[in-house]
Amino acid sequence: MIIKEIQEEIIAEFEMFDDWMQRYEYIIEMGKSLPLVQEQYKTKENLIKGCQSKVWLHADYMDGKLTFTADSDAILTKGIIALLLRVFNNQSPKDILSEDPFFIDEIGLKEHLSPTRANGLTSMVKQLKLYALAYQAKYN
């Protein structure tokens, strides 16, 4: 599935909820299904800077696509990175770089996060894009 279709699917899912408490619960549930980063990658180098919580992000490149794993020490943050990985996992670096995560604004996520969590969300997107840029430069 292409990035745009995944984002539209997420938007449709969030429209089913009546309020933000239900949406937060859904995000937290998504975090429980997150493909966790292996302990060997829970290093200082894989920590996303700018997040209030600890968030580790690791990328692998195979067959022209990036595969991400992540973990966080906070349940809501784990759900947020899970949402982002749902959009960007198993995509080419080119597609990751060319697509903006418009679903964030569409579902109103940033405005329903504390300022520090919103900054963390921006840092997560930035790190995903940096991985894509690095792998694109290396393999293209």
Image (tube, rainbow, N blue to C red):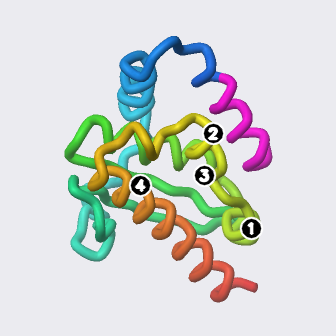
- The secondary structure type at the circle numbered 4 is helix
Q: Which residue is mark 2?
A: 106
Q: Which residue is mark 1?
A: 98
Q: What residue sits 22% from the left and 42% below the top?
A: 74
Q: CA distance from mark 2 to mark 1?
A: 18 Å
Q: What residue sits 66% from the left and 87% below the top?
A: 137
Magenta residues span 1-12
Q: Residues within 10 Å of mark 1 (few under 14, many from 20)?
A: few
Q: Residues within 10 Å of mark 4 (few under 14, many from 20)?
A: many
Q: Which residue is mark 3?
A: 89
Q: Quadrant of residue 67?
A: bottom right
Marker disc for residue 121: 4
Q: Residues within 10 Å of mark 2 (few under 14, many from 20)?
A: some
| Dominant secondary structure of the residues highlighted in magenta in the image | helix
- The secondary structure type at the circle numbered 3 is loop
- The secondary structure type at the circle numbered 2 is helix
